[in-house]
Amino acid sequence: MFQMIACDLAVLTIAMIFYAWRDGYIARSRRQAVLNDRVAYMLWMAAQRIH
C-alpha cells in the first residue's frame, strides 16, 4: 500500500514540476512573440517614412 502511495506522489510531483515549467515557457514565448511583432511593426513604419 505504501509503495502505491509513494509512486502516486512521485508521479504527481513530476507532473506539477512539468506544468510549472511549461507555464513559464509559454509565458516567455508569448512575451518574445509580442516583442518581435512590435519590432517588426516599428521597422515597417520606419521604412514607410523613408519612401
Image (tube, rainbow, N blue to C red):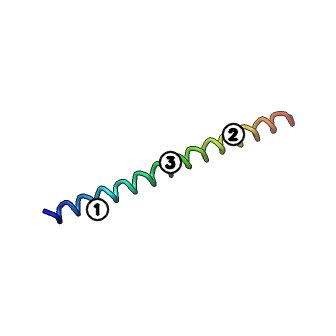
Question: Callout 2, which amino acid?
Answer: Arg
Measuring from the top left, give residue 15's x and y in whole percent.
34, 55
Figure quadrant of residue 37: top right
Q: Secondary structure at mark 2?
A: helix
Residue on which disc 1 sits: 10
Q: Mark 2 against mark 3, which lies toward the viewer? A: 3
Image coordinates of residue 35 in percent, x first then y, are 66, 44
Query: Could you say whether the residue bearing mark 1 is in a helix, strand or loop?
Result: helix
- Residue shown at the point (17%, 66%) measured from the top left: 3
- Measure the alpha-carbon separation of dots 1 and 2: 42 Å
CB atoms at circles 1 and 3 under 8 Å apart?
Answer: no
Instruction: Name, please, the residue furthest toward the front.
Output: 2
Residue occupied by mark 2: 38
Image quadrant containing the N terminus: bottom left
Residue at image point 43% right, 52% down: 20
For the image, the number of numbered tags is: 3
Q: Please tell me whether mark 1 or mark 2 is closer to you in this view.
A: 1
38 shown above or below 6: above
Q: Give the residue type that dot 1 points to.
A: Ala
In the rendered image, which residue does mark 3 sit on? 26
Per the image, label 3 sits on a secondary structure element best described as helix
Q: Residues within 10 Å of mark 2 (few under 14, many from 20)?
A: few
| Pointer 1 or 3: first along the chain | 1
x 50%, y 48%: residue: 26
